[in-house]
Image (tube, rainbow, N blue to C red):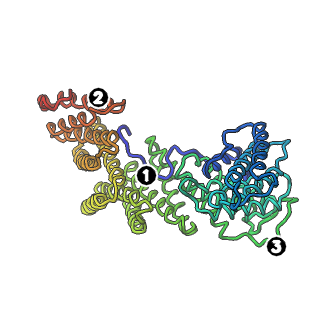
């Protein structure tokens, strides 16, 4: 609807990309990807060879760096130690040598006609030496170097060696703190797990491959929430995982080796917990897609029954996740269920005009939201939870009003106000302000539609006025100098809606004053959005003056 500005408080937007089709990639195939490797390497610290993109250049640089390191070691070629005078220069030279060796391997890894296995082994040896000297800095880099070596061993047909090397990479990276001041180990750990998936499959260890895939997907789930660049990786892993159980034959209860592959020692039947976790991840993907389908239908004013069916199926899918989701994912799964129930209630009320039916999922959503709030620590995003809870409370209060449950409406509206007023930060207040403004904008649009049909719009105007007044109050409260332009624009937008509803309610003088204040609020702001808001305010005042001559005092008229 025009004029809405509230962005849905969802993990995935309605415009999120779909999972790859079955033709985009073969299941379980995670070949070496230089782009992903470079991104992971860039998050582990400075790479002195990062700017070089030609193998011919890096080959020459390896020779230069080798000679530099040999000179730093001295004429006798003895390995330096902290007690020797050459220690600082030798350490620097060795780091430069390891960087360029790894860069050369990365540029040629997966390319036919190049044998870089020996160089990958040498790079790992050099990185081990650096890790012994400065573990905090070089252990994660050793882990990523081992990932390169895993791919080289696998390409050479040394599958058993590749498994051991890949597991060492996982062990090293898995023991490191995930995020530091200037680094993030998780992308490198994902690459190690992906390499292990390939090597485990080559050795017939399919359950191990599934475990590694689940772990990599969980890591990418967190990364994609923090950085949009990881979303395509997450989508590919989720798609792969969704096909994993059937493609690996785990439905029969036993992990079977690929034809001709070396089988592992005495493999047991597939672990039911692993399969259940994979199924849970698949269910989460399916639930997210159903939720997105419902949002698409809502955004396009589409088929109400279809939207209700999609969101109802999403609720059932999220509910099914709760019994099998890992403990560290349970809180997020509960929030997804609460969000889906809230959306179900809104769709039943707004698209199907069934407010009494909407109260059931709405009340359940509110109960879950209260539980989430009690379980959320301040550091875990309390402000965001309060924002979601406030929106749920407020929406349910209006559904109760539409259902004729006046007492419940009043109680819920009061609770919504109370919980957001005592919020710990401005994000919850701004989120509630956006929700209230969205409702006020809906009221403006609904009154226009009712007027066109010749139907009474008094009840809609009255409810909209209460909403727009609250939005204006909240947006005045959060206005400060930290985000002046954005928050001023938001306040002006709500003032304009409030003024329009006041005029419809017969309070034309107050309505015109609100419109004039909207103009004054954005008058000093630069940019096209501010200019558009000024023009909208001036147009609204002209319309108000035409409908109610003489209501706007000269001192209030925009100049």
Place of residue 385 in the rendered image (x, y in percent of width and height, measured from the top left): 40, 59
Give the mark, 2 or 3, whose residue is nearer the N terminus.
3
Place of residue 117 in the rendered image (x, y in percent of width and height, measured from the top left): 83, 51
Residue nearest the viewer, comparing 229 with 318: 229
Give the mark, 2 or 1, whose residue is nearer the N terminus.
1
Q: Secondary structure at mark 2?
A: helix
Disc 2 residue crowd, few under 14, some 14–19, many 20+, Cα 10 Å: few
Q: Secondary structure at mark 3?
A: loop
- Based on the displayed image, in which of its 4 quarters is residue 515 positioned? top left
Left or right: 154 with respect to 428?
right
Give the mark, 3 or 1, whose residue is nearer the N terminus.
1
Asked if one can make out residue 56 in the rendered structure from this viewpoint, the answer is: yes
How many angstroms separate mark 2 from mark 1 (CA)?
A: 30 Å
Q: Are marks 3 and 1 in contact (CB under 8 Å)?
A: no
Q: Are marks 2 and 1 in contact (CB under 8 Å)?
A: no
Residue at the image point whose x is 69% and y is 56% from the top: 85
Place of residue 350 in the rendered image (x, y in percent of width and height, measured from the top left): 37, 49
Q: Name the residue that disc number 1 marks.
A: 9
Residue 497, placed above or below residue 478: above
Left or right: 16 with respect to 453?
right
How many angstroms separate mark 3 from mark 1 (CA)?
A: 49 Å
Q: Which mark is residue 336?
A: none
Q: Secondary structure at mark 1?
A: loop
Asked if one can make out residue 441 in the rendered structure from this viewpoint, the answer is: no
Q: Name the residue that disc number 3 marks.
A: 266
Identity of the residue furthest to the right in this view: 260
Residue at the image point whose x is 39% and y is 68% from the top: 374
How many angstroms separate mark 2 from mark 3 (CA)?
A: 76 Å
Residue 182, placed above or below residue 275: above
- Based on the displayed image, in which of its 4 quarters is residue 183 positioned? bottom right
Q: Name the residue that disc number 2 marks.
A: 535
Place of residue 245 in the rendered image (x, y in percent of width and height, measured from the top left): 70, 61
């Amino acid at each position: 609807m025009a004029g809405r500005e509230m962005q849905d408080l969802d993990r995935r937007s309605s415009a999120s990309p779909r999972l790859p089709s079955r033709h985009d990639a073969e299941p379980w195939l995670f070949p070496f990807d230089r782009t992903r490797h470079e991104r992971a390497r860039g998050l582990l610290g400075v790479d002195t060879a990062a700017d070089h993109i030609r193998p011919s250049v890096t080959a020459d640089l390896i020779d230069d760096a080798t000679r530099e390191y040999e000179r730093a070691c001295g004429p006798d070629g003895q390995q330096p130690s902290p007690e020797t005078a050459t220690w600082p220069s030798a350490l620097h030279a060795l780091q430069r040598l390891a960087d360029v060796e790894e860069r050369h391997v990365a540029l040629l890894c997966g390319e036919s006609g190049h044998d870089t296995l020996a160089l990958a082994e040498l790079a790992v040896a050099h990185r081990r030496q650096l890790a012994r000297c400065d573990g905090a800095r070089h252990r994660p880099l050793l882990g990523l170097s081992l990932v390169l070596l895993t791919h080289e061993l696998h390409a050479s047909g040394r599958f058993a060696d590749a498994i051991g090397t890949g597991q060492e990479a996982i062990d090293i990276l898995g023991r490191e703190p995930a995020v530091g001041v200037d680094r993030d180990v998780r992308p490198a750990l994902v690459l190690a797990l992906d390499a292990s998936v390939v090597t485990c499959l080559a050795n017939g260890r399919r359950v191990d491959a599934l475990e590694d895939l689940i772990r990599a997907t969980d890591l990418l789930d967190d990364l994609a929430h923090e950085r949009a660049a990881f979303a395509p990786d997450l989508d590919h892993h989720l798609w792969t995982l969704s096909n994993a159980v059937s493609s690996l034959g785990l439905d029969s209860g036993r992990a079977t080796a690929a034809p001709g592959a070396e089988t592992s020692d005495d493999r047991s039947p597939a672990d039911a917990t692993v399969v259940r976790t994979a199924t849970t991840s698949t269910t989460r993907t399916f639930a997210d897609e159903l939720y997105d389908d419902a949002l698409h239908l809502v955004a396009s004013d589409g088929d109400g029954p279809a939207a209700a069916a999609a969101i109802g199926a999403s609720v059932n899918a999220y509910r099914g996740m709760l019994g099998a989701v890992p403990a560290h994912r349970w809180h997020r799964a509960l929030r997804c269920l609460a969000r889906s129930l809230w959306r179900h209630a809104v769709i039943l009320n707004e698209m199907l005009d069934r407010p009494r039916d909407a109260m059931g999922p709405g009340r359940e959503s509110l109960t879950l939201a209260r539980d989430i709030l009690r379980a959320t620590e301040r550091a875990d995003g309390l402000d965001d939870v309060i924002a979601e809870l406030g929106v749920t409370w407020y929406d349910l209060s209006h559904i109760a009003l539409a259902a004729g449950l006046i007492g419940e409406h009043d109680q819920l509206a009061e609770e919504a106000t109370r919980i957001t007023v005592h919020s710990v930060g401005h994000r919850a207040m701004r989120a509630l302000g956006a929700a209230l403004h969205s409702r006020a904008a809906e009221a403006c649009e609904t009154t226009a539609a009712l007027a066109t049909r010749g139907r009474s719009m008094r009840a809609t105007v009255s409810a909209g006025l209460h909403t727009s007044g609250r939005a204006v109050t909240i947006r005045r409260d959060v206005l400060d100098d930290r985000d002046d332009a954005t928050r001023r624009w938001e306040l002006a937008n709500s003032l304009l809606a409030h003024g329009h509803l006041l005029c419809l309610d017969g309070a034309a003088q107050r309505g015109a004053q609100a419109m004039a204040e909207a103009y004054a609020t954005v008058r000093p702001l630069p940019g096209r959005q501010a200019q558009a808001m000024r023009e909208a305010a001036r147009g609204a005042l002209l319309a108000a003056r035409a409908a109610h001559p003489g209501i706007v005092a000269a001192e209030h008229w925009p100049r």
